[in-house]
Every structure is written in structure tokens, then in C-alpha cells.
Image (spheres, grey):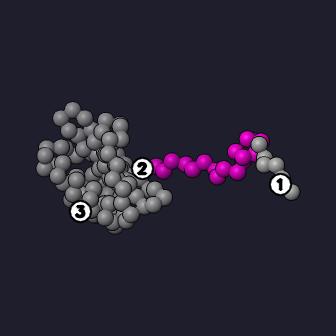
Amino acid sequence: MNEPRCTNRSRAGALTPARRRSPVPIVLWRLRGATDDLRGLVIEASFGYAFGFELDAELVFLHLHAMLDGLIAFADRVEAALLAQGWRVIPDALPSITRTGIWRSSCRCGPNC
């Protein structure tokens, strides 16, 4: 009556879902401090979004958020506070994306600069 369970491990491995690719982070801004560089990143996750600090190429902070608008507002406040503390903007060769989806350079003159 009872059928034996499958003990073949290779078959069990075949039932696992396909590997997920790591999401590519979006760089919101890059700042230079006294000794290191800091990048503000947005990473898309299955539950929403994450904001991360990458200090000298090492992820040191991750803040989870369900909505992108709130996360971008948080990142803007962090950037403003760091600039007030003496961090300097690193000019980018690549544009970054804003909350509204408008591509911009590191210039803060306005959206059409």
C-alpha cells in the first residue's frame, strides 16, 4: 500500500526553482568623503526595494522599503545631510535616475540641465 519515497538526490535537485539572478543596483549618487567614496544604491527586491550604502566598494548599510517613492525621498534626505557634513559630489560619466524617472547627470541645476 505504501509506495517507497524517492531517495535519488539528483531528482530532488531537479525540482528546485531556477536560480534567480542578482539584481543590478541603480546608483543614485556618489559622494567623496575625507578618505573614502560612498555610493547611494537602489536594489529591486521581491518585496519592494532596498536602499544601500556602498562605502569604498563594500555594502555597509541596507534599508528596506516597500515603495520606491518613499525610498528615493529617504535617499535624497541622506544625500542632503551628507553634503551638509562636508561630503562632495563625484561627477558621474553615467546618468542616474530620479524618483520621477527623468534621467539626470550629477549636476543639480535642474531636470533639463
- Residue at position x 19%, y 44% from top? 88
- Residue closest to the eye, 9 or 34: 9
Q: Identify residue for label 1.
A: 2
**Mark 1 neighbour density, 10 Å: few (under 14) some (14–19) many (20 or more):** few
Please tell me whether residue 47 is drawn above or below residue 56 in the rendered image.
below
Q: Which mark is residue 25?
A: 2
Q: What is the residue that sits farthest to the top in this orientation?
A: 35
**Which callout, 2 or 1, points at the residue further toward the start of the chain?**
1
- Residue at position x 27%, y 56% from top? 75
Label 3, secondary structure: give it.
Answer: loop
Label 1, secondary structure: give it.
Answer: loop
- Residue at position x 83%, y 53% from top? 3
> Residue 33's quadrant in the figure?
top left
**Which callout, 3 or 1, points at the residue further toward the start of the chain?**
1
Q: Quadrant of the C terminus?
A: bottom left
Type of residue at label 3? Gly
State the separation of the CA atoms marked 3 and 1.
Answer: 72 Å
Q: Which mark is residue 110?
A: 3
Decide whether residue 68 is among the magenta residues. no
Type of residue at label 1? Asn
Q: Quadrant of the N terminus?
A: bottom right
Type of residue at label 2? Pro
Q: Position of residue 2 (x, y in %)?
A: 83, 54
- Residue at position x 31%, y 60% from top? 72
Horizontally, residue 100 falls left or right of residue 86, namely right
- Residue closest to the eye, 22 or 12: 12
